Image (cartoon, rainbow, N blue to C red):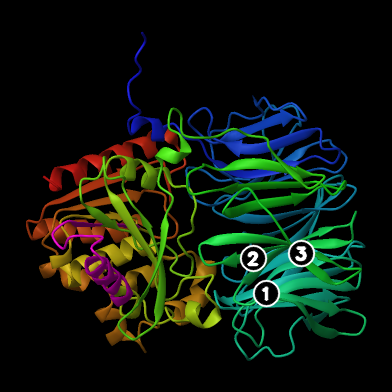
Amino acid sequence: MIKFKQPDVENFFQTFGIQAFAVNKDESQLAFSTNLNGKYNLWAMDLPNAFPYPLSFHNQSCSELAFDKQGRYLLAIMDQDGDENGQIYAVPPKGGSLEPLRTHEGARHMGLNLSKDGERLYYTSTKDDQTFLKSYCYDIKNEDEKVIHDGKDAATYLAAKSPDEQSFVYVKHYANTYVLAFVKKDGQEIYLTPDREEQHTVSGVEFVSDSLIYFTTNYGEDFSYLARFDLEKESFEKVADVEKEDFDSVYYDQSSNSLYIRAEKGVKDKLYQFSLNEETLNVIDIPVNEIAGLKVAESGNLYLMGRTAVRPPNIYMRKDSQWKQLTKYNVPGVKEEEMAEPELHTYKSFDGLEIEAQFFKAKPENSNGHVILWPHGGPQAAERATFRSLFQFLVYRGYSIFAPNFRGSTGYGLKFSKMVEGDWGHGPRLDNIEGLEYLFKKGLADRDKVLLMGGSYGGYMALLLHGRHADYFKAVVDIFGPCNLFSFIESVPEHWKPVMKQWVGDPVEDKEKLTEDSPIEYLDSMTKPMFVIQGAKDPRVVKAESDQIVEALKEKGRDVKYLVLDDEGHGFSKKANEMRVYEEVLAFFDEYIK
């Protein structure tokens, strides 16, 4: 009788990711960026068959993909080793070399928006204005380019164009919770919401005709809803909402004259269809917890990319109200029921604020009794009920993971999201501590068996919690987290800088608060073993942030391990690097639970 070994953590290393995808006009080809060969490249499937074949061998991340409506080419935005300076390339539909289309060293291009005839490309770039940005129209046939908008006051992005290409909607990003939108026509700028002074956001934007615009906004309310702007009448109108759900992206389906709307409700996404004829809103069942991308074909078929807590990213097609899974990514050798579905918990923080958290609980037969506190990144983001191989293999190995959506997280309304602005280190920090106290009271964790790990803002919070509450933790992992809010404010990308005063604080006006909330100020209290991980090309949290904390701790003779990945940015785009990091994190934690 043949006996197979039980799956081990190595199985979780073999999961694949999907970054972006596109479907051609007649739905005969699906293209997507995936790391099937260990690095991200473009792959495709000829539908309805579902066997992937490679299109490119660039070995770099891709943030956006778009097919020419005429089927002549595929456009892709790719960076270099995580530097996030996306360049625009053209690729033959059947694959081959990348042809540079719009490139500029050190600049970032974003927002692929092709004309119907495929002759003109509209996009936004930092190449001529790194702070406020410019938007362009590039004539692909004649190789001519013109600036169609100069940003001012804040980073300004092209969001949508009218079918006749005479009107354009731009969003102006003052802060993550203060995003205005205006339509520009004949040189005139008309804002979509009535009051520009009241802070609110505008997100998904779609033209359904040359004069009618639908979008999502939380103008005048706490949660975002669907709104309509009539360009001829210059009128704003609320159209539809769902209580305590944040409407986000909007997608127009011309075949049914309806809109698909992605909504956030806590740790999961929902999908709605809004009929423009009947003005009715209906929920659409989806096979995922998080929608990472959605495309509407001219036929009305939907193509969705998303994840569940126990299933990696996959692409699905919806036809005749039925979903079909096109990609088959999973964890090799591990059944979904062997992985951890998160338990949802709610607790009250130090000031009575209600916090929602997920608890990924190790199975009793595997549990080593230790809990890892995971403060998420952002901070104006949220930990969703979606797949992280890092989580699942740690849980499989016996660790439980506690992931609170502390104040500042998204999906809980505008007021909740604003609570982190100018307060990076007090309220959110105590929300995390109160979460641990909740676990202790419920008997879900032991005080002497808690570890700490986070990335980006979560890395910052891991450093700060270590510095101010070291007694709670046995060991700490910081993945590209800022350690000094003053140097962090100065080193972010230029187009981020206009938002920093509201988001983090002003180095002069808020000097005392920024000092108090900078982890570098608490070196004497950082007494527990630490592992710091950093991408050398990270443009968001630069390597100098991790260098600072590591050098300062080593000067004090502290136990600190430092791993720098030379070919990564703000994340892990290469499978070999991801595997190395995960293996070393596991080994680090295993060493200190003995």
Q: Is residue 41 magenta?
A: no
Percent position (x, y) of residue 429? 30, 74
Task: Please name whichever residue, 227 or 543, is drawn nearer the observer in this view of the structure.
Answer: 227
What's the CA distance linking mark 2 and mark 3? 12 Å
Q: What residue is rendered at 67% in x and 74% in y? A: 242
What's the CA distance linking mark 3 and mark 1? 11 Å
Mark toward the start of the polypeptide (2 vs 3): 2
**Rendered view: 209 above or below 254:** below
- Side (left or right) of 570 relative to 105: left
Res 263 label? 2
Percent position (x, y) of residue 224? 65, 76
Mark toward the start of the polypeptide (3 vs 1): 1
- Side (left or right) of 259 relative to 210: left
- Side (left or right) of 594 relative to 138: left
Could one spot residue 126 in this view of the protein? Answer: no
Over which residues does the magenta segment extend? 430-454
Disc 2 and disc 1 in contact, CB within 8 angstroms: yes
Task: Please name whichever residue, 95 or 7, is drawn nearer the observer in this view of the structure.
Answer: 7
Q: Quadrant of the C terminus?
A: top left
The amino acid at mark 1 is Val
Task: Please name whichever residue, 305 or 561, is drawn nearer the observer in this view of the structure.
Answer: 305
| In this rendering, the label closer to the viewer, 2 or 3 | 3
| In this rendering, the label closer to the viewer, 2 or 1 | 1
